[in-house]
Amino acid sequence: EAGVVQSPRYKIIEKKQPVAFWCNPISGHNTLYWYLQNLGQGPELLIRYENEEAVDDSQLPKDRFSAERLKGVDSTLKIQPAELGDSAVYLCARTGQGDQPQHFGDGTRLSIL
Amino acid sequence: AQTVTQSQPEMSVQEAETVTLSCTYDTSESDYYLFWYKQPPSRQMILVIRQEAYKQQNATENRFSVNFQKAAKSFSLKISDSQLGDAAMYFCAYRTYGSSNTGKLIFGQGTTLQVKP
């Protein structure tokens, strides 16, 4: 199966600046996920999309985080303004074909100065 | 709410030996999936093995096998004939069983496995 492409791979910004991450699930599966992975910990779901609709965003800090998935393919996750505690890896995933589990991208490592 | 616990932050094993990583979980559901994912330093999360809770038989994938104890809510991973390439962080994960496979994964804290040559 085709993978999940994320960019950028690394991002370094100063606090209070905006930042955006991009994800392309390649094979166009309907369900797309954004996870936050703090250093040395397991990923935690930020938001889940079914096509263009965000069906689970209960853990997305909506005061500074936003996401969109136009046309039900690519997705963008934005933080504005970034805080020091946002330093982490942001992972994108999609469901596999049939009954297969989720496939993950390489992630974007965000560092806030 | 479901939780997943991995009580071993770090483990080490000699190359060619066998190692077992522990995982326990808490749920009130009767049907669910359990997974082990591997995350090498390059960071891409890769599926190692999965288990459907309704299946009594333990899953096996080549050198990887699980010991699934549903009543005890335990799901350990055994790696036989460990190889240097097995060195990574391993995550145990839970997903609700439903009409589709689109539910979120709930991860444990991870276990870092070191393989010594």
Image: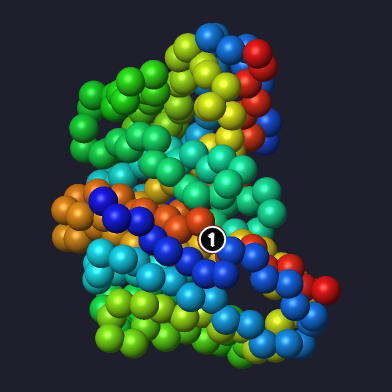
Does A40 sit above or below residue A12? above
**Image location of residue A64, percent across then percent down:** 63, 87
Q: Is residue A81 visible?
A: yes
Three-letter amino acid code of the residue under disc 1:
Gly
Residue bearing mark 1: A107
Residue at the (63%, 51%) spot, across then down = A41
- Describe residue B89's horizontal placement relative to residue B78 as left or right: right
Image mark 1: chain: A
Q: Residue furthest top?
A: B17
Q: Dot 1 surroundings within 10 Å: few (below 14), some, or many (20 or more)? A: many
Q: Is residue B4 visible?
A: no
**Image location of residue A20, percent across then percent down:** 57, 81
Quarter of the picture holding the N terminus of chain B = bottom left
Q: Residue furthest right?
A: A113
**Image location of residue A87, percent across then percent down:** 71, 68
Residue at the (61%, 43%) spot, across then down = B41
Relative depth, front residue between B35 and B16: B16
The answer to which image quadrant residue B13 occupies is top right
Quarter of the picture holding the C terminus of chain B = top right
**Image location of residue B55, percent across then percent down:** 21, 32
Does B37 sit above or below residue A99? above
Residue at the (44%, 32%) spot, across then down = B74
Does B38 sit above or below residue B82? below
Does B94 sit above or below residue B112? below
